[in-house]
Amino acid sequence: MILVVLALIPGGAASGTRAVNVEVEAGPVWQSRNDVEIPNDGTATRFSLVDLVGSGPYFSYRAYISFDFARKHGVRLLLAPLTIEDSGTPSEPIRFEGEAFEPGTPVNATYRFNSYRLTYRYTLVDNERWCWRVGLTGKIRDAEISLSQRGVSASNSNVGFVPLLHLSGEWRWSQRLSMVLDADALAAPQGRAEDVAVKLSYRPADRWTMAVGYRMVEGGADVEDVYTFAWLHYAVVSVAVRL
């Protein structure tokens, strides 16, 4: 079921009027890296989900809702579910979460990485050519990796909070055409998270915007319980409306 997404067109409220903004983004996603070792203590196999099931493409979508409650201040909610389900045949034995998976026999794999974020954004610049915003994002990560093979199954799931820094910008070529940058990212010794999009945006009417572009999601964690790093690439199409 595709969520209806609610998001602010960066810099869309140039007049300072308050409005709820809605955006739907969807498209194929490929994985160029998805490395896993669970637990991360030397007893498990470090393996690649890309090598096991392939790079894709898989279907993805996300939804935003945003509101500028003052001339320079706004909030944005993101709902970004992602599930990759596929099968492949390992060439080597895999030990994962205490279970052994044999080579030469198909394995069903699931990679779930749902992201729910709330962002506060402050507008630094908003004029005819440019709009730049900075802010803070609170992210809830709902993740799971599971394998199953002929009656043997193992799964590791995790729900956690991740703070991120936010940056968004819009270069307005004309009243209707612009280039948009949108990023949430932060790095720490335990891991990192990056979600960066670049889109070409066209506004056919005052309340509507369409865009196409590229999104990259990269990051993971290297802690005692898990080692998992993924690099995902999205080709995206979006439609936004200001209510």
Image (tube, grey):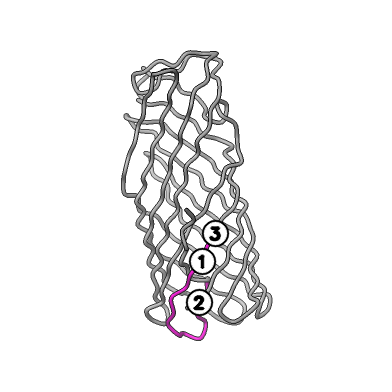
Question: Label 1 belongs to which residue?
Answer: 23
- Check the image and report above or below for 128 versus 201: below
State the CA–CA distance, disc 1 to disc 3: 7 Å
Looking at marks 3 and 2 on the same chain, the residue that comes earlier in the sequence is marked by 3
Query: Which residue is pictured at 62% across the width and 62% down the height?
Result: 199
**Count of numbered circles in the view:** 3
Q: Where is residue 110 in the image (x, y as percent from the top left)?
A: 46, 34
Q: How would you rate the neighbour count of disc 3 (Cα within 10 Å): few for under 14, some for 14-19, many for 20 or more?
A: many
Per the rendered image, the range of residues in magenta is 10-24
Question: Which mark is on residue 25?
Answer: 3
Coordinates of residue 77 in the picture (x, y in percent): 40, 63
The numbered disc on residue 107 is none
- Classify mark 2: residues with Cα within 10 Å, few (<14), some (14-19) or many (20+): many
Relative to 14, is 68 on the left or the right?
Answer: left
Marks 1 and 3 close (CB-CB < 8 Å) = yes
Residue kind at label 2, given as amino acid type:
Arg
Report the residue at 52% width, 20% height from top.
106
- Between 108 and 240, the one nearer to me in the picture: 108
User: Magenta stretch: dominant SS?
Assistant: loop
Mark 1 surroundings within 10 Å by alpha-carbon count, few (fewer than 14), some (14 through 19), many (20 or more): many
Between residues 15 and 49, which one lies in front from this camera angle? 49
Element type where label 1 sits in the image: strand
- Residue at 47% from the left image edge and 67% from the top image edge: 7
Where residue 22 appears, as percent x and y from the top left, is 48, 69
Say which element carries label 3.
Answer: strand
Residue type of the residue flagged with mark 3: Glu
The CA distance from mark 3 to mark 2 is 15 Å
Q: In this view, does 170 lie to the left or right of 63?
A: right
Q: Disc 1 residue type?
A: Glu
Residue picked out by circle 2: 242
